[in-house]
Each structure stands twice: as C-alpha cells, then as structure tokens.
Amino acid sequence: MVVVALAAASVGGGVVLGAISQRRSSTVTSEAGGVYRRAPTAVGILSVVVVALAAGAAVGIHVALAQSGRDAALEAFGSGSRVVEVEAIVTGKVEPRAGGQRAFDASIRLIGSDGGALSGWADAAVRVPGEQVSSGLDVGARIRVSGTSRPAYPGDRAVVQILAHETEIVEPPTGILRIAADLRQSLVRAAGGLPGGGGELVPGLAVGDTSAVSSQTDADMKASSLSHLTAVSGANCALVVGIAFVAAAGLGAGRRVRVIAGLGALVGFVILVTPEPSVVRAAMMAGIAMLAVLLGRAGAGVALLSAAVVLLLLFDPWLAGSLGFALSVAATAALLTLARPLASGLTRVMPAPLALALSVPLAAQLACGPLLVLIDPSVPLWGVPANLLAAPAAPAATVLGLAACIAAPLPVLQSGLAALAWLPAAWIAGIADVASGLPFARVPWASGLLGALLLALMGTLAALALGLPEQRPRSTRVRRGSALLLAAVVTIWTCTTVVTTIAQRWGIPRDWSILMCDVGQGDAVLVRSEGATALIDTGHDPALMSACLDRVGVTRLDLLVLTHFDKDHVGGTEAVVGRADTVLHGPTDGSADERLLADLAQAGAQVVSAQDGMTGTLGGAHWSVLWPRATALFAAGNDSSVTVSIEGGGVPRSLFLGDLSAEPQRMLRASTRGVVEVVKVSHHGSADQDPGLYDQIAPRIGLIGAGADNTYGHPTATTLAMLQGSAVGRTDQDGIVAVVGEGETLALWREHAAPVGGGG
C-alpha cells in the first residue's frame, strides 16, 4: 500500500513541478521578440525529483503514523473470524451489493458485554442484509451491529470487515447530514413512480443514488459503457459550480463573491451526494480552480489535476488503492490532454463538430479501458457511440434531477421536475438497452495485467494514429506507422478471435443434449430437446455464465430453474435476465431473493414456485419436480433445492439434485424409481450424500460442477468412490462436459479429455 501511495504521489508531484519547470526552462524569448524552446535545465529536473520524493515521503509518514492505530484495532478484533458487537458511525454511502446486501464504510469500535468500549475507533467495511436497511441508515447515523468480523484485505482503508447479523439504529443522521439524506430519499421516492429504466436512473444521474436501479438496467448500462453516468464525477461538480458562478454573476456580484458562491455550492453538493473518491477528486480540482480565479491566475487543467491528486493522496493515501479514484483521474487527464489532439485528427475524416463530440468519449475510453479490463476482461464495442448519443441528455437529466432533489419541500414542484428529468434519463436508458443488445456488445479480452498492457498498447497506437499532426514529417511517419501497426494488431486479433470461437464451437459436439458449463465453484447445466433449452442454475459469476451461453450459441431459455438461492447457484442470473420465458424456483429466504425474481418477472419471465408433482415439457422432453415437498420439511436453502427429472425427446433419463444433503436424498428414494442414465451430483460432490440413492438410480454418467481452486475438497474421494462404475465429468478437471447420444450410444464428452462412453 505504501509503495502504491508513494508511486502515485511521486508521479503526481513530478507532473505538478514538471509542468512549472518545463514552462520556465523550455521557453526563451529572443531579442527580436521571437520564442524558441530548449531542453529543461538540470535545476528543473532536480526540482522535479526533489518534489516527487518529498511528496512520497509525506505519504509514507502519514501511513507510518496511522499504522500503530490500525495494528491496535486489528489486535482487538483478532486475526480470524469472530462474532462481535460494535458501535459504528456510517461514513460512506450505503450502496447495493450482490445478493440484496447493502455495503458502506464506517468508523467502528468494539463493544463489550457491559456496553463499554473495548477498542478505539477504526475504519471498517460493513455489509448488512437488505431487509435490515431503513431510511435511518445513512451517512452520519450511529448504529449498533452484531455480526462476524474478519480482517480486511491488505492495503484497504478498512482495518476489518463486518458482516452484520443484526443492525440497530441508535441515532439517525443529524443536522446537515439528515437534511442531505432526506433530500436524496425524497428524490428516490419521487422518481419511483416513473416508468421504465428512466425512472430508475434519475436519482443516479442527479445524486449518484443507484439503489433503485434494477439488475437488468444495471447490466445494460455496464454493457454499453454508460454506467459512469450514474457515478457522480467531475462533470456534475462542474455543472454545479458553473450554475452557482453564473447565477452570482447574473446578480452583479464581483469576482470574490462569485468564487465564494461556487465554492459554497460545491461543498453543499459534496455533502449531498456523499464524498465518493471521484467526487472528492473533482471537488478538490474545482476548489483549486476557483482559488486560481480568485487570485486572478487561471491555471492549466493538467496542473490543477496534478495538484488535486497530490493533495488528496497526502491527505488520504488509501485513495491510491481505489479503482474509482484511478478511473476518475485517468478519464480527466485524458480529456485534458488527449481530447483536443483526437478532435484535430478526426477532422480529417469527419465534420469538426462531430469530431469534437466524438473525441471526448473516445479519449476517456482509451484511458480507462486498461483499468476496466482488470475487473472485467471484455471491451464494450459500442461504448463510444453510446456515450456520444447519451452526452446531450446527461447534463439535462443531472440538472433537472438535482433541481427536483432540492425541491423536496414542495412535493408538486418536485414531482414535475422529476418527470422532466425522466425524459433525458429514459433516452439514456433506451440507448443502454439497444446498445447492450447489439452484436458483440462486449468483446472478450485477455484478463489480468497482460490484458491491461495489450489494451494500453492499442490505445497508444490509436492515439498516435489519430492525434499526431500531419505538418511535421516525423509526426507523419509515426502516425502512419502507428496506424499500420494498429491495423495489423486488430486484424490478427480479430482473425484469432474468430478462429478460436469457431474452433470452440466446433469442438463441442453439436448433438449434445445435456451440457454442464465450467463456471468455477458452482452449477450451471443446460438441457436441450428439439430446439428448446433449459438452464438449471447460473453459477456465481454473470461473465462466466454469459461466456458459456455465447460459446454454445444459446440466446434464449425456454425454462430457467433456480434450485435455491445460494450465490454459487444464482449469482450469474444477471446474464440471463430478459432471456428466460419461464422461471422455476425454490423457496425464497429474504428480500434479496424476492428482488431477483422480481427482476426476472419485470424482464418478461413467468415466475413459478416449484413444488413436488409439477410437470411440464421442454421441446419433446418431459420434466417433473420431485422436490421440495409441499409440507416444507426443510428451511429454504440446500435441503429445499428444486430437484427435477427430465427425459425423452433426445434427452436421456436424468436427475438434477441441486445441493440436497443425505437426509432429503434418503426421503427422495421413494419418488425416484428405476435406473437414471445421467445424474447431476449433489452439492459439487461433497461427502454429504446418500449412497442408497445412488445405488438405486445406478447412473451411467455423473456430472459434478466444481471449481479448480475450491478449498472445500470438492469432489470428495468418498463421493467419487460412490460413483465407481459411472463415467464422471467434473468441471474442475474437464472444463465443459457434455452428454451426447442415448441408450447404447450414450457418451460423455470432456473439453480437456477424450470422449468416454457411458459406464466407462
């Protein structure tokens, strides 16, 4: 962490003084009044080094001074997981997370059984179940939490993580924080009655509140590279400061009053939207710019950005580990340094206004792409056009939404302004919906550091090819060489991708009837009969689920079975929202499960709670629900997993056991008669199985979904021994596995091994 902070601060400090010294040392006026350039002096270079080292040292001292308190807090909470009771003050925005949870940053201290404090205050990351969230849980609230603690990741600002079991609000936010929370919540309520994705986006576009955004809209915004619009950033700060500045000028105020008005509006806006990393960066930069105006020295944008970065890292070194902060700085730097050259280059092939408009999202995408592939190894192919079309609507939605937020004391006015904000917000939602549905909306890319470096290389080549001027011979040669190299790389990459995709499609048998996707530690099984397709569970990761569906060419699901709501079985459901006709699900346990089903229903699916005895058809195949029993013998979860039997229409008789443990498996024997040709082994091959059931069904093929790096020991040796005599396909070793043929021709295909006949 210290190294990262030192590097970031050093770079920022070097840029700040480098810009100053370069300006002083590289421009000289001749006696004739002309201007020529010379290389920076040794003094200028030394100054850059000195300031960079000083900034790095300051950050290191900050971290060193804070470390003793962090060590003390970590010692109080322990080095492992433990049940604790803490007092907490919410310091960060309460944001939605997967599974319906809410997450926020807080300052906490450990509380003993007598109510006394056992530790000092420490930074923590807290997660609470969605059903425990009330209007009082907001920035500034004092709460008491009973839950499980565990050490945070090294380098995080948080010392510990708290997973809450019970949450009690001791005191809601007070003063200006209460006012800000009420304003945000009133805007969410006012926009809640507005239709479609536009109503969901209004609070996000105005104040960064994404609590109302459905999983479908969120997926569309991410796939179209528009999700940054709902994260408050520099553009929002610039609008607020600009409006306040212009309003003060319109009233005849002097420069000092105009600056004070702008700064006041900025401070109020930051409090309203909560100080997220991108907001803090933008606010700091705007504050420095306003100070420059007050002093009558309008500074260059790069110098302001560099000063903001250095000051923020000196004040809060842990921002160096924030991806949001890094993306914000990268995007701003690109707009300041790259947008103008790109616009000049694009004017060679298009009208100047279009070139200028296109250069802004292009510059941002070139700069941010390498960072984004570190968390999602794909490239949004339609991101630049989508941003270009959304650009005119975003400021209108932001300003109108912000006005609606401030108008909370006047409900009629607030409703009217929210309705006006809905129009541009609906336009943005429509663009996201269309762009995410276009072919190649997200193109797969290499993951990790290699992927980031490759994308950075391509971005650099694109910037050189488009941004270098034509007037200078050397620039022309570099520009043409970059264009040729970029074309060669794109051609090779495209051909490789196409050939790989075709080879992957050809590698999988075309006549498969059952296919288990390789989604790591989780289940996702496709069943196909006469053109109709069912998916049983979705794994834990939407990207892995989507990749498997794309690879086998499945775009629509006639039936989606969610056996139960553990993340390793429903975490990838985002990939199939809007693609399923019927959803068959197990018992729910809380608002998060209900919200997931509501998203599926809103996207057009018919949602049905599964019960023993239900039947249906899939193409020419017939399916039956064997579990759970209507008497609700077990609580929601593993032992109430939806268990289905499917056979006919080209599908061998198959049994899909979800995560049932041994006890419900024993009870299932009575309703499972005869031999089963294929079984989806329960709970990833854990040891908690009923050998009697497997002896009774005598499967010829067993399918096990397990992660190659799982720490549970799945599949266990006892389960594999129980399947002796069956052909076993396990995703941790075999990758994708598929069942082909019927009867005597039944066979198991493995992605990483040669086909093996059933029973072999």
Image (cartoon, rainbow, N blue to C red):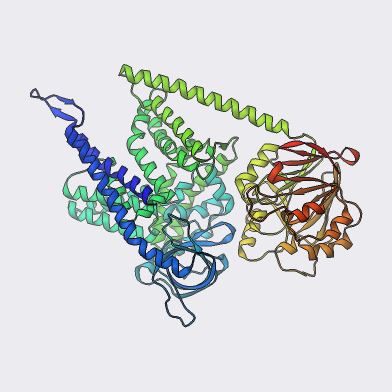
Q: Residue 632 at what x, y percent from top left? A: 77, 69
Q: Can residue 410 be seen in this view?
A: no
Residue 337 image-quadrant placement = top left
Residue 546 image-quadrant placement = top right
Residue sitting at x 35%, y 68%? 176
How many circles with numbers are drawn on the protein?
Answer: 0
Can you name the residue that lies furthest to the left here?
31
Name the image quarter holding the C terminus: top right
- Nearer to us in this view, 69 or 448: 69
Residue 150 falls left or right of residue 299: right
Q: Residue 738 at what x, y percent from top left? A: 77, 41
- Nearer to us in this view, 746 or 35: 746
Residue sitting at x 22%, y 53%? 258
Can you name the residue that lies furthest to the bottom here?
114
Residue 494 falls left or right of residue 124: right
- Is 112 situated above or below 291? below
- Is 465 situated above or below 141? above
Q: Residue 560 at what x, y percent from top left? A: 72, 51
